[in-house]
Image (tube, rainbow, N blue to C red):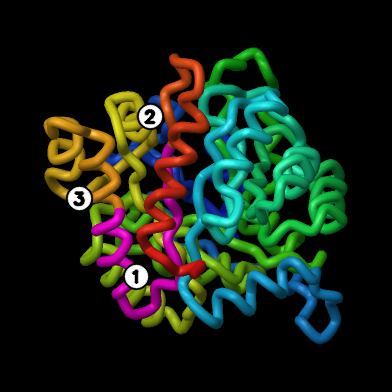
Amino acid sequence: MVAAAVREACPKRMEYGPCGGVELDGRCEVAAHPCVFLDEPTVRWHGTAPTGTDGVDRIPSAERMRQLLATRPVVVADFPARALDRASLERCADVLAGRVDAVLAGDSGTSRVQFPPAYRARLIQDRGVAVWAGFHNRDRNRVALEGELAALADAGVAGVHCVTGDHTLTGDRPDAMPVFDLDSTRTAALASAVGHLVSVGESPTTPPIDRRAARLAEKLRAGADVCFVDHCGGVEPVRRFIGDVRDEGADPAFVVCVPMVVDAGSAALLRSFTSLVLPEGFLDRILHARDPRAAGLDAVTELCEALLAVDGVSGVDLSGGPSHGEPGAEESFADAMGSVADRLGLLA
């Protein structure tokens, strides 16, 4: 169990740190000191064991996604719509309907005020698109988290992606009090007990690199089923990470984040991600091309195909988003993601 002093020194008050936001040099993303978990041993899961599958009424939509993952690779797309804009949500959903297996509908990276996850999921699913709901701990205490998980179950989401969440100091509402009553590991246990298909993220190239596989193994023991592998540099880092996780005695479904870049705006958004690591030359190939959009579609498709050929990879997540400067940017970006999914042909 992590020492109380370590937890109190973490700005997110994590029990099972470190988070995915550690800078590449080991610094905390919002404090002047190194991440307080770097010199601590891996924190073992010591919470209440999640209810076993025999004792949980699995959510039908979660079971459908679970069965799909066991059947073929899936294509998930980060949902690019504007926050607090129902029309944008509906237009982007219409563009992606029938082209991807699900959308990862988490909070917009450019805004801290959001529609609640279950309401957002309902709006999207009403347009015929399955939702993998992003679910963070920044703004809600554990009672509100439990209520939102119940609402997501009632909405019939395909999965719940549990993340600790960005600190309020990194967004456009630094005046808001950060909550962080729980972290992603403890939320994964709650979501599993409700009957959700639960995913968590892990960052193989973020310090402490040598303990990231062990940290994921603890999230899986808490109740997670799927790992979304954060941007870590391409095929070989993903292959090594899957091998490291298997060496820890765990073998989840791995959905690998693929950088979706079609122009300078989408490249700039990706560069804003903490501890981003991309394949060498990936951005230059796209941004220096005569037609960056066409070059981006080619590069992203090729990377998806290479990753899907790695043993253990169960799918890809087209990750990123548009710059929000021009009208229609969100729908255009959604169409680019749909075009990559069309090329992969997994839904045919």
* N-term mark: 1 or 2: 2
Within-10-Å neighbours for mark 1: few <14, some 14–19, many 20+: many
> Which residue ends up furthest to the front in the rendered image?
348
**Magenta-colored span:** 301-320
Query: Can you see residue 212?
Result: yes
Q: Position of residue 131 (x, y in %)?
A: 66, 52
Instruction: Say which residue label 3 marks.
Output: 279
Instruction: Say which residue label 2 marks.
Output: 269
The amino acid marked with disc number 3 is: Pro
Within-10-Å neighbours for mark 3: few <14, some 14–19, many 20+: some
The relative height of residue 237 versus residue 78 in the rendered view (above or below) is below
Query: Residue, x 51% and y 75% (percent of image)?
Result: 252
Instruction: Say which residue label 1 marks.
Output: 308
Q: Is residue 304 found inside the magenta-colored segment of the image?
A: yes
* N-term mark: 1 or 3: 3
Query: Residue, x 29% and y 51% (percent of image)?
Result: 300
